[in-house]
Amino acid sequence: MAGRFSKPNAFASISVAVLTAAVVLGGPAEVWAQTGPGDGATAFDAIIVTARKRDELAQTVPISISAYDDVAVKRLNIETIQDLRFSAPSVYVAQSTFRTDTLNVTIRGQRNFEATGLQFDTASAVYVDGVYYARPVGLNGTLFDVDTVQVLKGPQGTLVGRNTTGGAILYETRRPGDTFGGNLTATIGSYGRHEAEGALNVPITDKLAVRAAASWSEVDGYIANNYLDSATGYANNTAAQGSRKIAGLFSLQWKPNDTLSVLLRANLSAFHSTGTAYADIGVFEGNVLAAANRPSICNIPGTCTPFTDLLGHAITPYYSDFNTRTVSTAPTAYNALINSVNRVKARGFWTTEQALTNYNVGHYQTYSGAVQKDFSSTLNAKLTTAYRTWDTSGIASSRGLPYATNIFIYGTPNYKSYQSELTLNGSSFGRKLDWTSGLFYFRENSPNDGDQLYLFLPSGNAPFAAAGRQITYTDFTRNGGENISYAAYAQGTYRLTDATRVTAGLRYTVDERYALLATQTVRTPSTAATTATVPNGVFDPASYTIYGINYAGQTRACALTNTGGVLLPLSACSVEINRTFRKPTWTLAIDHDLASGVLVYATARSGYRSGAINSGAINPAVVVARPEEVQDYEIGMKSDWNLAGMPVRFNISAYYTDYKNIQIQTSLPNVTIAVGPGGAPCTQAIYNANQCVGTSNDNVTLNARKARIEGAEWDLMIKPLKGLTLSTAGSYLDAIYTDYTFTPPAGYLLPTGATNLSDTPFPLPKWQASYGGSYTLPFKAVAGLTFDEVTLSARAYWQARNEADTRPYNPSQLTSDYTLVNLRLDIANIGGSRANFAAFMTNATNNRVCQPEPAGVLGSSPQGTFGVVGTSGVVQCLPLPPRMVGATLSYRF
């Protein structure tokens, strides 16, 4: 296996292909004629991007970019940032598997953690109107009033900054203009979809203009919930993945003269969701014995043992006699998990039986200002400052289950960030050198930035005061954090000749991170006797109430330890962590006009993701992860041509990335106070023999050693006939953990049977591809009704199965490749009225598609089954949307 994954020749092979394509396209063949930016004309969209802090045509920037204007955003059905995965090569964007307000953005294999607090930073940065959105929370709002959406591939550590080891997404909305006008759009569709949006641009004077845009949408959930407790009559029919969104964009631009402009913006939005839900799609049985030598199938709650869940609902076993596999017919067995699975499978793929609704609410506000001043024709300065605040709350529980044995409540009540950036753009040496320099400052804080977890392990008739059977409430809400980052950067592009340019850049970043850890626990029901078994536990005879149920007595304790692994007393349950990280990042590139309209380039650059403080860990000695580092090499070509009279655009790139100090979270056995036989120290060998007493499992933060990523991207468009455009885009990703090993910190050991991920692939699809075509009909009237044009378009997205280390998982948890097809009809300027109509269908073939877990496989219940060989469980799937149809009517004035 090591030989298979350690070879570097894939990058070499791709590089040869890229260079060969460049030579062939750049050669003197009569069938080729350039129609690209070099001649001032192109048959394709010429989109302006700001990847290098200045306005440039995307085809002239020597890095891989996917750029879309407002027309392309609508044509490709890019309604949220998540939809970019279906069009932009090397981009994989997925909703968090446990909350709908959070998107995990992956570019070129660099991905985010599921964590949503201040502890771990993103690998791909998102900027909206120049404002850095440091957290992945709230990124699933509707894209509207779009100017451009730009996806920059590969490390952007020089000009865009830290936390862009994978790339960056730059989303720009429209600015106020000097012409009165606007638009209105209404959409209706499947699952009760109703949307409206509009924009109004008003020039108050010839120097002052304002613009306002708003968006509102509601859609019912597409995962039907049929939960019912037949014993009590309690039901839950709230469909999952429903949402209500409202947003407004307000801007004012003042241009007192040709050299000065002031732009003020406010971006306000709210998001309400009925949350996620899993569909239970099958049961698998392993060979690991459950407690008391019962068969493995008894590991599934409600299969062999009765219990009462956190809602107070009694669950009678599915098997009344597990030895003979006799199925229970008791009414209270209705919600035993296997019964529920059978009903869900009978009803259909987009159904569930989930006891609790995973609601999600968020409010987001961003205020920004930008002052731009031209000091001369060769010197420009821009100062941008912004203030951003948001709050979210929600619940993630049940996972499609007909009972509640854990309830996860999350909330960020008061997030705030401040940022400011000064950028200078200039030209020197007779405009041979274009340079950019700047200063950047960012600060974010979030007090009470923590979650709550109610956990009950059902192994008895009801929760009662015995080890492992109490309800444990873990309270992270006292935790908080603050991060400060500042940097200086400079980059220049020098024209060696009219056709050749060299670029060099450097950035130096300082990150200061602070975290307050104050996690506490409550165990209930409890007595003074059970409290005495909890280190530093404090007994409280008062009852504890969960979902209206009172439990007698409670034990309160600190969940944190000192650096020696000993739990702190409740009175001293507070630890402060401070860390500072410093890192230079650089860029060196050369690009050359191989022929008129053919740009080839080679780039070497470094990237940096800030170190992290994991507020979910309990030992201050193991909460800090060092920064991640990447070293990236890319070659590519961008070209616009005519091939025998047919316009062609062909872009291709290949890259190789060294990835070091991979930030990970894992659970390790704490043996600080543990002993082996006869009081001997607990060594790895003694622990592996299960002879240590006094161990505990702790959440720790570490860095694995290294990985390598190599891949390629392509984008081809051609217009073979008048009105017909064909396109394909895609990517190949070969990402391998070459050395995932790490050394356990002092006081910790490696877990027994842990799987080393060395020489295994990243849990991502190796291939992604999209294919599309649009055809504008050659007539402009039907039955006396005129229009400017009628365009039919189709787009298919194909994704290979997720690569992952599948050794620990049951084969039924493996993912599959899939294809999604979208169809669209656009009619422009109907009857000369400036009204446009569109009809669309997404997932036209109604494919049943599952979103995998972060590990790259399908989920399973109970969670203890996930990734444990030989256990039994239920295969769970988070379904992507089914076929949906809709229509849009818009009007511009």
Image (cartoon, helix red, strand yellow):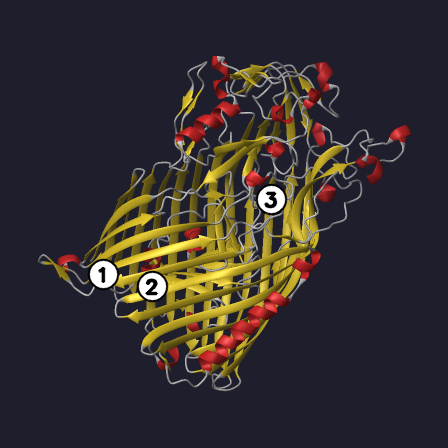
Spatial CA distance of label 3 from label 2 is 38 Å
> Which amino acid lies under the numbered mark 2 shown in the image of this protein?
Trp
Quarter holding the C terminus is bottom left
Mark 2, residue position: 254
Spatial CA distance of label 2 from label 1 is 15 Å
Q: Residue furthest front?
A: 324
Left-right relation of 675 to 630: right
Mark 3, residue position: 481
From the top left corner, tell me how far across and down residue 473 is, in percent.
61, 26
User: Element type at marker 2?
Assistant: strand
Quarter holding the N terminus is bottom right
Q: In the image shown, does 756 or 606 lie closer to the viewer?
A: 756
> Would residue 886 be seen by someone viewing this image from the given angle?
yes
Mark 3, Cα crowd under 10 Å, few <14 / some 14-19 / many 20+, is: many
Q: In the image shown, does 93 or 267 lie closer to the viewer?
A: 93
Within the image, what quadrant is residue 690 found in? top right
Mark 1, residue position: 180
Q: Disc 2 or disc 1, which is closer to the eye?
A: 1
> Which amino acid lies under the numbered mark 3 shown in the image of this protein?
Gly
From the top left corner, tell me how far across and down residue 570 is, in percent.
70, 28
Residue found at x 28% / y 43%: 189
Looking at marks 1 and 3 on the same chain, the residue that comes earlier in the sequence is marked by 1
Q: In the image shown, does 653 or 553 lie closer to the viewer?
A: 653
Relative vertical location of residue 674 with respect to residue 139 in this rendering, above or below: above
Spatial CA distance of label 1 from label 3 is 46 Å
> Which amino acid lies under the numbered mark 1 shown in the image of this protein?
Phe
Relative vertical location of residue 534 with respect to residue 878 in this rendering, above or below: above
Residue found at x 47% / y 81%: 593
> Would residue 47 be seen by someone viewing this image from the given angle?
no
Looking at marks 3 and 2 on the same chain, the residue that comes earlier in the sequence is marked by 2
